[in-house]
Image (tube, coloured by chain):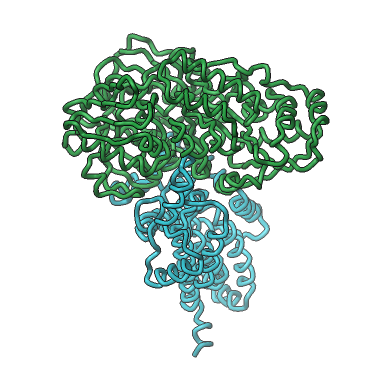
Amino acid sequence: MIPEKPGRSANQRMTRRQLFYVAGGLAMSVGVLPNLLSACGDDDDTPTSVFGTGTESESTAEATLATVVPDTEEPRRGGTQKIALTGDSPNLDPHQTTDSIVMLVASHLYETLFTWDADYRAVPLLAESHAVSKDGLLNRVTLRKGVRFHNDAEMQAADVIASIERWSQISGLGEGLLEATEEIVEVDPYTIEFRMNAPFGTFAMALSRQLQGCAIYPKSVVGASSDTDLVEYVGTGPYSLVEWNPDQHVLMERFDGYFSPEGAPDGYAGSKAQYLDSIEFVPVPNEASRIAGMQAGDYDYVETGSPDQLPALAGSDSVVVDTLPADSWLNIVLNLRSPVLEDLRVRRAIQTALDHEAIMLAAFGEGFYDLTPELVPGAPTWYSDAGSEFFNQNDPAEARRLLAETAYDGSPLRIMTTQEVQQEYNATLTIQQQLKAVGFNVDLQVYDGATLSDRRDDEALWEMYTASASFRPDPVMRNLTASATGWWENDEKDQLLAELQAESDYDTRFALWEQVQQMFYEDVPRLKIGNSLRILVRSADLRDIGPTELQPDFSNAWLAG
Amino acid sequence: MLVVGSITFLLIHVTPGDPAAVMLGSEATPAQVARLRQQLGLNDPLLVQYPNWLLDVVRLDFGESFFLDRPVRAAIRDRVVPTLQLTVYASLVALAISIPAGIIAALKRNSLIDRTLMLLALAGSAIADFFLGILLILLFAVTLRWLPSGGYIPILDDPIGHVRSMLLPSLALGVSIAGLPARLIRSTMLDVLHEDYIRTAYAKGLAPATIATTHALRNALLPAVTVFGATIGDLLGGAIVVETVFSLPGMGQLVVNSIDRRDFPVIQGVVMVSAAAYLLVNLLTDVLYLYLDPRLRHVRR
């Protein structure tokens, strides 16, 4: 069996406060098309990741306290895995929400047409294959035959179409896909054709696993449901729902009728061995209680672990802590429509002034950050140094000189933050000091999460706020359009994003992306401060949890001993 | 009730934060948010929303939760059981601690026992209940592994598991609310013990224990009953912190989550129910007063 195969780190989960807070939050999957992009709001404004889970496949996952699992160990079938969540799943309907708890829980119940392999390429899951016509205007999806829902009905084209139609009513990503689609045609029960208005190079990505992804439900269930209400929790996933008692637990058991994809596990793709008899998700809102529960052996996995808890866990032989490679980053969103910041030279002065090291240290602490300029950490194939000359300049004298050349008149720079995300708050205090030191008049405004996400939609109310950008498997899913909060308007950039969207060749796309990243640093719509590193806390008995950037999938996990 | 409901209604609607935006997540388009607001009835002017809501409340219909996929009444019904249980158990713990402690401290006034007990009472009410909760978890769940670290087991599913899961939270909450009644009982006991009728009882040759428990206690309990009633009224609204530390699905967690999500109907429903419970407990306290203190009955007649 596969050795302990670490994944990459990903989407964060944090306290439930942050969660609800985030209208602007944990969204990924933002834009896939230019028109789609324009249809979407903000993506990157997630509150700072408070560390989730994950390990790394290519790169080395440094285990701080980890015991090395021998490759030879045989997976054991059976047992119940208990997972401590930071809060209850608000629903079990992935179409509804960008909440990453829903992705963690519900991805065991439902599947998507496509999913990601270890290199973050979209590959078929419920689909058998996917073909695109030469002109890119026809996407033909063939479904796997014999896939059953938990209610024993076979999954067919009608189910898929009904699900996609509902999803595209609710999610921004789906709306974008629908806009690009002329019509969806059921050719036969196992073949669907999407006739497009324009080439859609990222078709499979749009229908892959993600926050607010397109889970496939039976047509009968979709028919009885509304946009805001799913009447039954029936999917094709490897585990089926036993019961959900809100704030108490979500319990699911192995689905014996599951029709596993073929091939060795590869990222989120490949076969699912379903070793675990059942999986129980327990909401444990208090962090100290989660950690105590881990130590007491009540849980096998904690949805989110904070490095603050490391001392409490050191020396425990039943709990393992892994440090995950970077997959999300702290950033400062600038309001380009603010009278102060519409001047590029003022933004450059801010960029030049900041000492990223000090900010990250204050926010995350020694050893839990790194400073690199790439904008899609966690997906190493998209790593680029473009614009690094502008990154982390830490030159207050130069910043003062730059600022003196502008018409800046000492009007207040309103920085919004929230104490609900301690890391963000600490970072903001440091930023405030550094900007004051070069002559800015800084007005720090502290709000609760929901208020903050309300206020940032109003361009008249702020100049900057701190946020965390969460994992994206592909740069096109990073919302850098003018519709994202901050309102970065640049025609050349939008053209590049559109090409990035339509194009499917990796090398071409990489070249396009490098140009976008360069412009990101030259235009200063946002400031990337640094990557935050998360930790994963699990019981020593839990094996093979796979990648974690998009939350772990426990379909191949097993409990030793 | 009308005042409480109206204030709540107004407060949550003037507070920034849009439930539709929270529900849909960040990539929702303004059009989607607007459509959902329409569906949720949030676009109506407050002057329309308010009477509608008031009419529904009179019919005990609190509406449909935005997030929980169920009516508010059902959501509250689910959560009220753990909260009620926790309140009852914690009250028992508090009674079991405060009454004996108060009596003993009064009888041994200014002795080492008195000082120790009152110091403990002070410590009990001063220590934050989440901190006490964590300490209890560390001792009984992590170190000794006798009890679960959290979670809720319904009494009908598994009575023993239920008791095990409720023991630590009841203890944490009970200890933290026992301090004030203990001190009150002690001070009123001291007053009562100086009354003439107590001296008479001693003179009659009754055993000191009998005097303390039957003659003195009944009078000394009265102020404590008031305090206790108020405390229980509070607890029925949900012991937010203890419920969070021990992951109990009670009213406290419900209301905190709902505020975070701006789930207006649930917030309103919980506040109304809590206010009603508070009033009810106070009423019961007054009735109990009549029972405990015959003098009040005579006054009325």
Residue A543 appears in the rendering: no
Task: Looking at the picture, tell me which residue is in the foreground, A44 or A103.
Answer: A44
Q: Is residue A245 left or right of residue A467?
A: left
Q: Quadrant of residue A213?
A: top left
Q: Residue A379 placed where, x, y %?
A: 47, 19
Which residue is at a point 80% across and 36% down the rendered structure image?
A407
Q: Is residue B160 left or right of residue A513?
A: left
Q: Is residue B258 above or below residue A417?
A: below
Residue A64 appears in the rendering: yes
From the image, state the color of chain B: cyan
Q: Residue B14 placed where, x, y %?
A: 57, 59
Q: Residue B92 placed where, x, y %?
A: 45, 58
Q: Quadrant of residue A492?
A: top right
Task: Looking at the picture, tell me which residue is in the foreground, B124 or B155.
Answer: B155
Q: Is residue A474 above or below residue A58?
A: below
Q: Which chain is green?
A: A
Q: Is residue B120 above or below residue A522?
A: below
Q: Is residue A522 left or right of residue A116?
A: right
Q: Residue B159 placed where, x, y %?
A: 31, 49
Total residue callouts: 0
Q: Quadrant of residue A272?
A: top left
Which residue is at a point 60% across and 62% down the rendered structure image?
B107
Task: Looking at the picture, tell me which residue is in the foreground, A183 or A125.
Answer: A183
Q: Is residue B239 left or right of residue A526?
A: left
Task: Looking at the picture, tell me which residue is in the foreground, A170 or B80.
Answer: A170
